[in-house]
């Protein structure tokens, strides 16, 4: 039987999603808990491999298991044995061919910034404090340039396993609420450090250190050294993954 799971985690104390020898990772922690509950080895496929310090409230995984437990009971029991910073929020049965990574048609992230002269203790784990004055209009214009299909090689490390650098961006916008600036972006796929590098470079534009014209040029396939810094991981959250057929609607999680 194949299952899909909706996973939420605070990435602060994890070395990212992917299993690494000697490191605490979300994949290792979750697969170990599932293996304990299901009394069999469980191998996970994730929609996105988040970096160290990055959070998720919409990570999706798929896995196979032979069990008499209902999907909802799997989620409940697994979350009960997991540490406080990760939970299997939902679990559903899905068709045998479902693959959380391969079948994803888009992924969405948010990056949060406290743009104030004083920091916010309550936001310290999930947003980055930027005390500098930021031009909201320039931020909005920079975000609008990101929409569409572009070559994003300037926004991923020069030494990379990626061979295709074009990505289709369907959503790219900034909004402000309650003193927090949030960048929302949705794409068919993302490259390593892509969102954080985009944010770091857009902040340069908003501070008057880089022109919009120069930012637009970077979207045509410039070198990584020409773009801005990579923003800190703690501000980034994977918020959702979309599929042609929504696994949460088409399946019984009883």
Image (cartoon, rainbow, N blue to C red):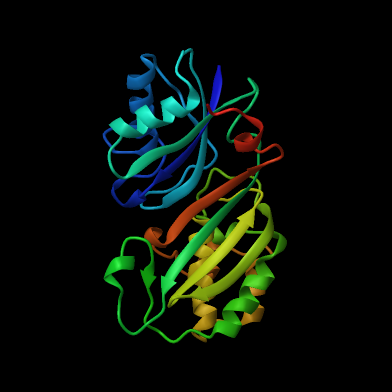
Residue 132, compared with residue 199, is above or below; it is below
Could you tell me if residue 29 is visible in this image? yes
Which residue is found at the position 38% from the left and 77% from the top?
A: 130
The percent position of residue 249, horizontal first and vertical second, equals 64, 37
Which residue is found at the position 45% from the left and 49% from the top?
A: 56
Q: Which residue is at the front of the view, 206 or 113?
A: 113
Q: Is residue 84 left or right of residue 92?
A: left
Total tally of numbered discs in the picture: 0
Q: Is residue 181 left or right of residue 162?
A: left
| Quarter occupied by residue 116 | bottom left
Which residue is found at the position 52% from the left and 26% from the top?
A: 254
Q: Is residue 135 left or right of residue 27?
A: right
Q: Is residue 129 left or right of residue 221?
A: left
The percent position of residue 140, horizontal first and vertical second, equals 61, 77
The percent position of residue 107, horizontal first and vertical second, equals 60, 49
Which residue is found at the position 29% from the left and 38% from the top?
A: 24
| Quarter occupied by residue 127 | bottom left
Could you tell me if residue 214 is visible in this image? no
Farthest residue in the front direction?
254
The percent position of residue 208, horizontal first and vertical second, equals 52, 86
Q: Which residue is at the front of the view, 172 or 84?
A: 84
Q: Which residue is at the front of the view, 162 or 254?
A: 254
Residue 229, compared with residue 18, is above or below; it is below
């Amino acid at each position: 039987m194949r299952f899909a799971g909706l996973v939420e985690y605070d990435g602060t104390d994890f070395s990212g999603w992917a299993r690494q020898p000697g490191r605490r990772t979300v994949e290792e922690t979750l697969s170990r808990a599932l293996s304990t509950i299901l009394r069999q080895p469980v191998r996970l496929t994730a929609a996105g491999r988040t970096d160290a310090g990055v959070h998720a409230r919409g990570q999706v995984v798929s896995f196979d298991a032979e069990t008499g437990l209902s999907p909802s009971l799997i989620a409940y029991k697994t979350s009960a044995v997991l540490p406080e910073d990760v939970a299997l929020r939902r679990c559903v049965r899905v068709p045998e061919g479902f693959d959380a990574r391969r079948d994803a048609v888009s992924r969405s992230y948010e990056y949060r910034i406290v743009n104030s002269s004083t920091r916010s203790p309550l936001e310290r784990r999930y947003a980055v404090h930027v005390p500098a004055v930021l031009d909201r209009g320039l931020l909005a214009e920079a975000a609008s340039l990101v929409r569409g299909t572009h070559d994003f090689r300037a926004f991923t490390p020069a030494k990379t396993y990626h061979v295709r650098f074009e990505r289709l961006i369907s959503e790219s916008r900034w909004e402000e609420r309650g003193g927090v600036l949030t960048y929302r972006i949705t794409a068919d796929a993302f490259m390593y450090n892509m969102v954080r590098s985009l944010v770091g470079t857009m902040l340069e534009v908003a501070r008057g250190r880089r022109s919009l014209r120069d930012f637009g040029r970077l979207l045509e396939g410039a070198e990584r050294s020409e773009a801005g810094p990579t923003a800190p991981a703690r501000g980034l959250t994977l918020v959702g993954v979309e599929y042609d057929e929504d696994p949460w609607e088409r399946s019984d999680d009883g």
